[in-house]
Image (cartoon, helix red, strand yellow):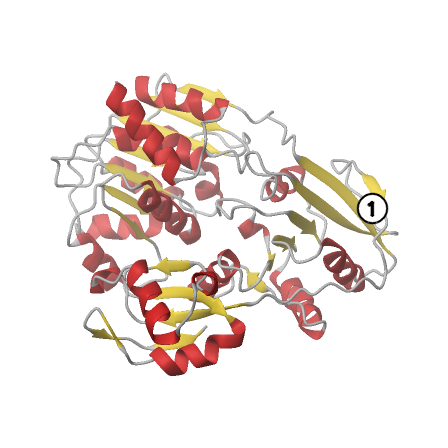
Amino acid sequence: MGNYIKAQQDILDKLKIEALNPMQEEALLSITSTANTVLLSPTGTGKTVAFLLPTIADLNKNCKNIQLLILVPSRELAIQIEQVIRTMGSGFKANAVYGGRPFSKDKLDLAHTPAILVGTPGRVADHLRRETFSVEDIETLVLDEFDKSLEVGFEKEMKEIISSLPAIKKRILTSATQDMEIPRFVGLKNELVIDYLDTKISNLEIKKVKSPDKNKLQTLVDLLHDIGNKPGIIFCNFKNTIQYVSDFLNENNIAHGCFQGGMEQIDRERALLKFRNGTHQIIIATDLAARGLDIPELNYIIHYQLPLKAEEFTHRNGRTARMNAEGTAYVLHWEKETLPDFIETDDIVVPKGKVTELATKWCTLFISGGRKDKISKGDIAGLLFKQCDLDKSEIGVIELKQDCAFVAVPKSKASFIVDTINNVRLKKKKVRVTMV
C-alpha cells in the first residue's frame, strides 16, 4: 500500500497537482472497488486524472496486449489524454488513434503494442474490423464524455466496439452533463454514480459587457485591450462568425488562432499547440472547444455570441477558473438583445481607448523529427543552445510528437534560427526546420 501511495504521489508531482480534490478522491475509491462507475462532474474539475490514476494502477506490466481502452468523442481529446498519460510517466505505453490521420501511422504506432489505447469510436471500430490488435486482454473500458460521443453520432460504432470486447470487467463513464440516458449496450449493472454536477465553480466571476453596436466587434476589441495580454477563448455560435471576428482582430493587429469543426485536423491541432506555447494568447472557437480540451490556466472566456442553452453556457464557462485557478466569463450583450434567463450577472463598463500590446514575443518552429527518430526535448534544446547561441529564457515550450516536434522561440530571432539549423543533423537525421 505504501508503494502504491508513493507511486500515486510521484504521478501527481509530474502533473504538478498538489492534492486530489474531493471528486477525484471519491472517483479513485469507486473505480478501485467497484466494477461500474459513472462520473458526473463539471468541465475543468479533473475527470481525466480521476479515471487515469486507478485504471493505470491496475495494469499488468507483464501483459503484452492492450488492457485499457478509452473512447472519446473528439480527436483533440484523444491527443490530450495521450499527452497526460505520457506526462504521468507510469511506464505504460499509450497511443491515440483517430480519424483525419493516415491509417499507416496508426499501424506503425501499434506495431509495438501499447497497454493503453485512446481513440475516437470511428477509428477504433475500423481497427477492430481489420483486426489490427488483440482484444482478449482489454479488461477496462472508459467512455469519456460518453454523452458527447452519442450526440455526435457514434452510437453505432460504440455498440460495435463494446460487443466485440469479451473480457471487460470494469466500465467507467464520464460526463459533464446529466441529460443523456445510458444505452443498454454499454452493459452497466449496479453502477455507482458519483455526481458533482451541482458543484459551483467558486473562483468564476461572470460579467456582462454592454455593446452599443449590434455586431459587438469594437466592444470586443475594447474588452481585449482592457483585459490585457492574457490567455482566453472567444466563443461564437457559428464558424462563419469566427471568420468575421478573426478578420476584425487581424485589422486591429491582435494575434489569435481559430478552432472550429470545419477546419482541417492539422490546422486545429496547430492552433491549440500555438496557444499552449504562447505564440498567440487568444483562440476564437465554436462550442467544439467548450468540452474535452484541457487547456490550462485560462484567465477568461468571452461569449461573443450568446449561448443558446444553459448547458452550453456552463460548458463554456468551465474552460476558465479550472481547479483552483480564478477566471472571468464575459458576456457581450447588445443593448437591444434579449438576455437568456440563465445568464444572471451585473453590468460592467469597458474603458474606451485603452491600448494594450496584445502581440506575443513567441513564434512556433516545426522540426521534421520526433520520438521515432530517438529525438528528445533535450536534443532540441541542446541544438538551439549550441548552434543558435540562445539562452534558457529564449527556448519556450517544446512539444514532441511521434514524427515531428514544435518549439517556441523568440519571434525576433525566428528567421535567424531557421537559417542556422534548417537541414542540420539531429540524432543522425537531417531535419527540416520551418516557421509554422
Q: Can residue 302 be seen here?
A: yes
Q: Is 247 drawn above or below residue 89 in the view shown?
A: below
Mark 1 lies on a secondary structure that is loop
Asked where in the image residue 141 lies, by quadrant, the reply is top left
Classify the position of the N terminus by image quarter.
top left
x then y, percent, for residue 71: 35, 42
Number of residue marks: 1
x then y, percent, for residue 412: 53, 75
**Relative to 209, 299 lies left or right:** left
The amino acid on which the numbered mark 1 sits, given as a three-letter code, is Thr
Q: Is 201 drawn above or below residue 32 in the view shown?
A: below
Considering every residue shown, the one lying at the far bottom of the view is 419
Residue indicated by mark 1: 338
Between 249 and 409, the one nearer to me in the picture: 409
At horizontal 33% and vertical 62% (from top left) the residue drawn is 101
Q: Can residue 183 be seen here?
A: no
Asked where in the image residue 4 lies, by quadrant, the reply is top left
Between 104 and 230, the one nearer to me in the picture: 230
x then y, percent, for residue 162: 28, 36
At horizontal 26% and vertical 19% (from top left) the residue drawn is 2
**Relative to 337, 269 lies left or right:** left
Q: Residues within 10 Å of mark 1 (few under 14, many from 20)?
A: few
At horizontal 44% and vertical 32% (from top left) the residue drawn is 174
